[in-house]
Image (tube, rainbow, N blue to C red):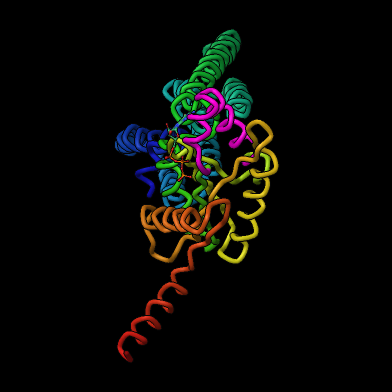
Amino acid sequence: MPWQRLQSDFRFALITLFGALATVCLLPIAGYRFATGDVAAGVIDLVVVAVIAGSVVYMWRGGSVEWAGRAAAGIGAIGVIVVASLVGLSGLLWTYPAVVAGFLLIERRHAIAYGAVTVLIVAATGQGFDSGFMRVAFAVTGLVVGLFAYIFAHRTEHQRMQLERLVTRDTLTSAANRRAMEQELPIAVETSRRGNVPVSLAVLDIDHFKRINDGHGHETGDRVLVDFARVIGAATRRGDRLFRYGGEEFVLLLPGIDTTALASLCDTLRARVADMVEVDGRPITVSIGAAELGARESVSEWLARADSAMYRAKRDGRNRVVVAPSQVEATVVDLLQRQAALRD
Ligand SMILES: Nc1nc2c(ncn2[C@@H]2O[C@H](COP(=O)(O)OP(=O)(O)OP(=O)(O)O)[C@@H](O)[C@H]2O)c(=O)[nH]1
């Protein structure tokens, strides 16, 4: 699902854009260099394009975004340094875009160091400077460009994170919202299948929540939702994700957890809620349905299986956990039932 990642992963999208731009801009320049007999510079341009395009392909095929960015930035810097020492002024000019591109490709604090080192090496080794003063002026202007790019990247990243928090968080409980869930579940499915590690999800629905609202007021209901999300958040691991699915229903994504571990984990959560969430000293309870992702199962089928397990927990008396059988178990049960029906 790399197309979905273009929307959900900002750095993934930036590196892809950089790869496309670098290819479109550098290929004609490489052609021009060959045409004018500048074979060495042409070869350097082609190597730069090949490494950058290779990094993007590696990332699209599931490789690390960080390493793809580092490889693209690294080859960009080497290309600029070598070309500046080979062709003079027309090579020197590429230093400025390389410094700015660093902020798109790698972490901000690394990008400022990367930009400063690239500018200083080019100032020291590049050809085409008329005088020592020109070298110093080049170094100073390059560093100023890097500093401005740093300030700009800092502000943009801060605002982007604020915006992302606003659109992906539920304002009442601070859990991730349904929109975030719709983006993250397909990624979790892809990660699980690629790494061949299990992933499970649990649907948690607070019991008789309407009675809390009706008997104690909406504000108390809101407070229960906040306490509930806090208790679940504190009882789960760092990589687990809690989403508010709607109303008093939450979804918990549990990477690395299979059907065997699911029942005891969910039961711990159920007990923790009953112990720690209350109204007027009376415990609030939760019904939980859980399911491990099945082979070839879609996100909606997976969610539907966990949801129907949760409804079974409600039907069986609430304040309990029902784990949906794994797909293999479900198929065996189905076959046995069909066999029994044929025999009758
Ligand atoms: N206080 C508060 N109430 C909410 C919020 N969102 C949904 N609700 C209420 O949650 C209640 C859900 O009630 P039901 O769907 O009947 O479920 P329930 O009473 O929990 O019953 P069971 O799920 O069958 O145990 C409704 O009264 C909604 O108005 C919210 O953000 N704050």
Q: How many labels does the image show?
A: 0
Q: In this view, does 144 lie above or below 165?
A: above
Q: Which of 77 and 221 is in front in this view?
A: 221
Residue closest to the eye, 328 or 212:
212
Q: Where residue 34 sits in the image (x, y, percent)? A: 33, 39
Q: Does the magenta stretch include residue 153?
A: no
Q: In which quadrant of this rendering is ligand 1 seen?
A: top left
Q: Where does residue 285 sit, x and y in percent of width and height?
A: 59, 44
Q: Is the magenta stretch mostly helix, strand or loop?
A: helix
Please tell me which residue is depicted at 45% across the width and 23% down the height of the picture.
97
Work out which residue is located at the far bottom of the displayed protein and give it: 343
The image quarter containing residue 241 is: top right
Tell me, yes or no, if residue 60 can be seen here.
yes
x and y, in percent, of residue 201 in the image: 51, 53
For residue 173, side relative to residue 58 (left or right) = right
Residue farthest toward the front in the current orientation of the protein:
215
Give residue 193's position: percent from left, percent from top: 47, 60
Residue drawn at point x = 38 percent, y = 77 percent: 334
The residue closer to the viewer here, 83 or 70, is: 70
Residue 209 magenta-drawn? Answer: yes
Q: Is residue 99 visible?
A: no
Tell me what residue is drawn at x 55 percent, y 33 percent: 225
Q: What stretch is highlighted in magenta?
A: 207-232
Q: Quadrant of the C terminus?
A: bottom left
Residue found at x 51% / y 38%: 69
- Above or below, 330 against 38 in this view is below
